[in-house]
Amino acid sequence: MGMKLMFIAMTFLIGLFGLVISLLLVNDKISPNNSVGVRTSETLANKDVWYKANRYFGKDFLIVSIIWLVVSVALYIYREKLEIPIILVITQLITVIGVLIPVVRIFSYLKKL
């Protein structure tokens, strides 16, 4: 597998993994734990806050995961026209922005709970 396909496949797998996790969070299928979900002292201390916060975060992360999947398909379609540095920049921007926005939003939401 070439480098281009490897980066595109990684982007797709991140999107797929994010999709699964976000659907589990949105549907309250992940109980309070120290591995997956929004883990703060508030969410770990109160199950109601845990589920509210993770539902909220899960919705944002679901959108980000779908964007990851769509971009990975677009990168695959246009892979012959794109150089590896461009693919890396696109995937890194999506990763940074895709993680940063939901994290900032969840901490803002937690202040309201």
Image (cartoon, rainbow, N blue to C red):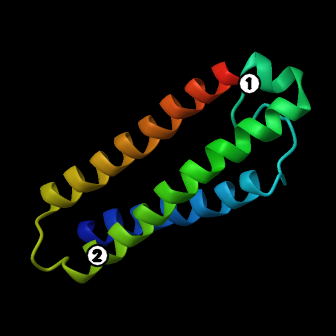
Where does residue 24 sit, x and y in percent of width and height? 75, 57
For the residue labelled by badge 1, is the local secondary structure a helix, a strand or a loop?
Answer: loop
**Frontmost residue, 15 versus 1:** 15
In the rendered structure, which amino acid carries the disc numbered 2? Answer: Ala
**Which residue is the site of mark 2?**
74
Classify residue 61 as left or right of residue 5.
Answer: right
Asked if one can make out residue 71 in the rendered structure from this viewpoint, the answer is yes
**Frontmost residue, 109 versus 95:** 109
User: Can you say which quadrant of the picture contains the C terminus?
Assistant: top right
**Which residue is the site of mark 1?**
113
Report, in whole angstroms, how far the alpha carbon at label 1 lies from the one at label 2: 39 Å
Above or below: residue 47 compared with residue 41: below
Classify residue 24 as left or right of residue 60.
Answer: right
Asked if one can make out residue 36 in the rendered structure from this viewpoint, the answer is no
Few, some or many residues within 10 Å of mark 2 (<14, 14–19, 20+): few
The residue sitting at the front extreme is 112
> Of circles 1 and 2, which is in front?
1
Where does residue 106 sit, x and y in percent of width and height? 59, 32
User: Can you say which quadrant of the picture contains the N terminus?
Assistant: bottom left
Q: Which of disc 2 and disc 1 is earlier in sequence? A: 2
Classify residue 103 as left or right of residue 93.
Answer: right
**Frontmost residue, 57 versus 20:** 57
Classify residue 77 as left or right of residue 108.
Answer: left
In the rendered structure, which amino acid carries the disc numbered 1? Answer: Leu
Residue sitting at 55 percent across and 66 percent down? Answer: 16
Q: Quadrant of residue 109?
A: top right
Where does residue 35 sit, x and y in percent of width and height? 74, 36
Above or below: residue 53 compared with residue 14: above
Residue sitting at 64 percent across and 19 percent down? Answer: 111
Where does residue 77 sit, x and y in percent of width and height? 25, 83
